[in-house]
Amino acid sequence: MKAIKDKLWIKTDVGGLARYENDYYHQVSQDVANVPGNPWFICTMWLAQYDIANARHQEDLRDAVKILEWVADHALPSGALAEQVHPYTNDPISVSPLTWSHATFVTCVWNISTNVELSCLRTSSHIQSLRFNRLIQNSKAGETSQSSGVFSLLPDRATPSYG
C-alpha cells in the first residue's frame, strides 16, 4: 500500500490519490511525476479503508482520520463531493456531486465508529468529530440553508449533529 501511495499521491498543495499513473480521463497536467492523475475522492478514501481494516490500535487510525479530514476540507462549500478535483486549484472535475464519493465517506466514518476493538477511539479528542459542510433541507419551510455539520463518533454509531 505504501508503494501505491508513494506512486499515486498528488504532490501539490491539493494532495489526494490518483486512480492510476498517467490517468488521461480529464487529465490536467503532463507532469506525471508530481501529478500522476487528478485526485479522486474514492481512491483517496480507499487508503483510509485500508488503514481502518488493518487497525489494531487507536494510533493505527491517524492516517485514516487525516484522509477523512482531507475529504471534508476538499468538499465544495455545500458539502458536495465531486468525482475528482483539479490537482492545482481543487475545483471539481467531472461529476459533482457523486453519490459514490459520499457513500465511501459514510462507509469510512461508519467503519471507524463501529470497530468494537477500538471502542476507546470514540472518546478520543483528536478524532472525536469530523467537520463537514452540508446543505440542510428545511422541509417545513421549503427552504435550503447551509450550515456546518459535525459527524460525532458516538458510542453506538456515527450520527450527524447539525448546528
Image: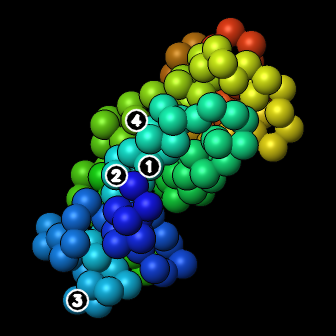
Q: Amino acid at mark 4?
A: Thr
Give SS at disc 2. helix
Label 4 to label 1: alpha-carbon separation: 11 Å
Give SS at disc 4. helix
Q: Is residue 8 visible?
A: yes
Q: Quadrant of residue 35?
A: bottom left
Looking at the image, which is closer to me, 90 or 5? 5
Residue at the farthest top position: 156
Determine which residue is flagged by label 1.
47
Q: Quadrant of residue 141?
A: top right
> At which x and y percent is residue 40?
34, 57
Give SS at disc 3. loop
Q: Amino acid at mark 2?
A: Cys
Dot label at residue 43: 2
Dot label at residue 11: none
Give SS at disc 1. helix
Determine which residue is flagged by label 3.
30
- Other-residue count near label 3 (Cα within 10 Å), few / some / many at <14 / 14–19 / ≥20: few
- Residue 132 is left or right of residue 2, and the answer is right
Assign the N terminus to one quadrant of the image.
Answer: bottom left
Which-is-in-front pick, marks 1 and 3? 1
- Other-residue count near label 4 (Cα within 10 Å), few / some / many at <14 / 14–19 / ≥20: some
Q: Is residue 147 visible?
A: no
Label 2 to label 4: alpha-carbon separation: 10 Å
Looking at the image, which is closer to me, 131 or 117? 117
For the point 34% across and 52% down, the residue is 43
For the point 55% across and 52% down, the residue is 67
> At which x and y percent is residue 162?
71, 27
The earlier-in-sequence mark between 3 and 2 is 3
Determine which residue is flagged by label 4.
104
